Image (tube, rainbow, N blue to C red):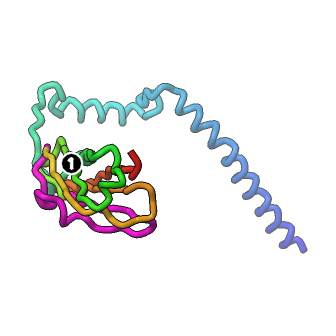
Amino acid sequence: MHNRQGKRQKYVRLVAILLAFAVALPFAVVTLAQSGGDESDSLPESVVQSEKEDSSSMPQAENTVVSPTSLPFTIEQQPNNKAPTISLEGPNCLGSDDRNDLVSIAISVSDIDDTSVLIDLSALVEEESINLTSFINEGTELTVPGIASATFPIPITEQSYILLVSHATDEDGAKSEAALVIPFRC
């Protein structure tokens, strides 16, 4: 029984010592941090003396000239690509006599950071998209800034308007969209 009490007392002493360090350690850290960063006050004099000797043998930073070093890799930055701007112009309306005729529109495109764009044209009739790109007179690639024209037959629809949609995509993949609604009643 005496052996058991001895082990318990040793255990209690060990826990008490660990608790004392656990409580004292944060206070010591705070006190050292508030001392202002003058590390030579807390270092033994022999260590401070050896640091002074080492610093005197080093060249001063003011006299040192730093030359650029090439790295074994290159960093490539993607350009800030701006999307092209596109607009559609056409007739204000189509009268009942014009329904069997052809419609002509103009597609204006510009892009500040590219030289050419790809364009397309379609008509949305109810839930169906009718591709009209083949009716673009200048083709699908347009030098910017530029204007293309398209002449196409009026799609058959029960709606009271034609909805045209055109896209412009630049060389870097940025895309813009424009729409034009042409009503059937003038």
Q: Quadrant of the N terminus?
A: bottom right
Up the image or down, 186 lies above or below 4; here it is: above
Q: Residue at x 67, y 41 (%)?
A: 24
84 vs 153, nearest the viewer: 153
Residue 60 appears in view: yes
Q: Residue 163: x, y in percent? A: 37, 56
What residue would you read off at disc 1?
A: 106
Q: Residue at x 10, y 50 (%)?
A: 143
- Assess whether residue 124 is covered by the magenta stretch: yes
48 vs 165, nearest the viewer: 165
Q: Residue 133: x, y in percent? A: 22, 64
Q: Quadrant of the C terminus?
A: top left
Quarter assignment of residue 110: top left
Relative to 141, is 40 on the left or the right?
right
Q: Residue 148: x, y in percent? A: 15, 51
Quarter assignment of residue 23: top right
Tag 1, which secondary structure?
A: strand
Q: Residues within 10 Å of mark 1 (few under 14, many from 20)?
A: some
Q: Residue at x 74, y 57 (%)?
A: 15
- Assess whether residue 43 is covered by the magenta stretch: no
Q: Residue at x 33, y 56 (%)?
A: 164
Q: How many numbered discs?
A: 1
At label 1, the amino acid type is Ala
Residue 72 appears in view: no
User: Which region of the structure is painted magenta?
Assistant: 119-145
